[in-house]
Amino acid sequence: MRLDKYLSDLGIGTRKEIKKLINSGLVTVDGETVYKADFKVSESSCITLDGETLVYSQYQYFLLNKPRGYLCTKDGAPNVLELVPDNYKDLNPVGRLDKDTEGLLIITNDGQLTHRLISPKYHIDKKYYFECDNPLPENAAELLAQPIDFSDFTSLPGILEPVNETSGYLTIQEGKYHQVKRMIGYLGSTVTYLKRTEYAFLNIEDLAVGEYRELTAEEINGLKGETENE
Ligand code: URA
């Protein structure tokens, strides 16, 4: 790939800024200062910027604890993308959480992985903590363990773990519009607070609301593994 693409993938700057850095002699490739933006490099080239050795990665993967009030849609403010570094191209949330939902959100520019993670083909567990206004019926767990026929889709069985009469955890494998709210609505209650606590093997116990961290290589590989078997 071209040297300027390598640097751009790492979020070093705009093409113009990168050209300036290269022209100023701040970039070396395998020990030699390089002045050409289209100089050919590979992932294994040893590249330094201002004396610092760079480690290449084509994509970025962030785990965010989304606060209430932030939107996951492309346009609309405040937006979840404001909460992660803004120097990378094409970052997008994996699926959506409602504006008033908190919790675990993956943000990445790996379009292929995003596509696979949101595909209904792979049944990835998503666990939500909810609070609701009316007490849950005694047979709530049985009711949600059956497919429910909504007007636009029939839900796969969900696993309900009540905490008390008006709160609990619901694990589902889909991500239909307002799905948790609608499943709790089916029980005759309205969700008053919703937080996604787990996505596959990931949780956000180490992140305060509004905080993010990068996923580790092991976690990224784990997510890819989740989309291997249908
Ligand atoms: N289900 C909902 O109802 N809302 C969300 O944000 C996520 C799942």
Image (tube, rainbow, N blue to C red):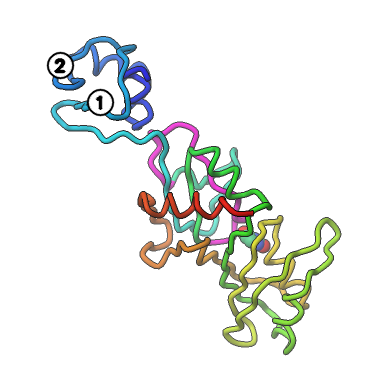
User: Residue 40 at x, y = what percent?
Assistant: 32, 15
Based on the picture, tell me whether residue 94 belongs to the magenta stretch.
Answer: yes
Give the quadrant of the N terminus: top left
* Front position in the image: 8 or 55: 55
The picture quadrant for ligand 1 comes to bottom right
Say whether residue 27 is visible. no
Q: Which residue is mark 1?
A: 45
> From this viewpoint, which residue is outermost toward the bottom?
138
* Front position in the image: 15 or 190: 15
Q: CA distance from mark 1 to mark 2?
A: 11 Å
Quarter of the image for residue 150 reads: bottom right
- The type of residue carrying mark 1 is Ser
| Residue 32, disc | 2
Q: Main secondary structure of the magenta part?
A: loop
Give the quadrant of the C terminus: bottom right
Q: Magenta segment, which residues? A: 83-102
Quarter of the image for residue 176 reads: bottom right
User: Residue 9 at x, y = what percent?
Assistant: 38, 29
Closest to the camera, between mark 1 and mark 2, is 1
Residue positioned 68% across, 79% down in the render:
133
Secondary structure at numbered mark 1: loop
Residue positioned 68% across, 71% down in the render:
158
Residue positioned 45% across, 31% down in the render:
89
Say whether residue 207 is visible. yes
User: Residue 205 at x, y = what percent?
Assistant: 40, 67
* Residue 167 higher or lower than 81, as above or below: below
In this rendering, position of residue 152 left or right of residue 72: right
- The type of residue carrying mark 2 is Glu
Secondary structure at numbered mark 2: strand
In this rendering, position of residue 120 left or right of residue 43: right
Sequence-wise, the earlier of marks 1 and 2 is 2
* Front position in the image: 195 or 175: 175
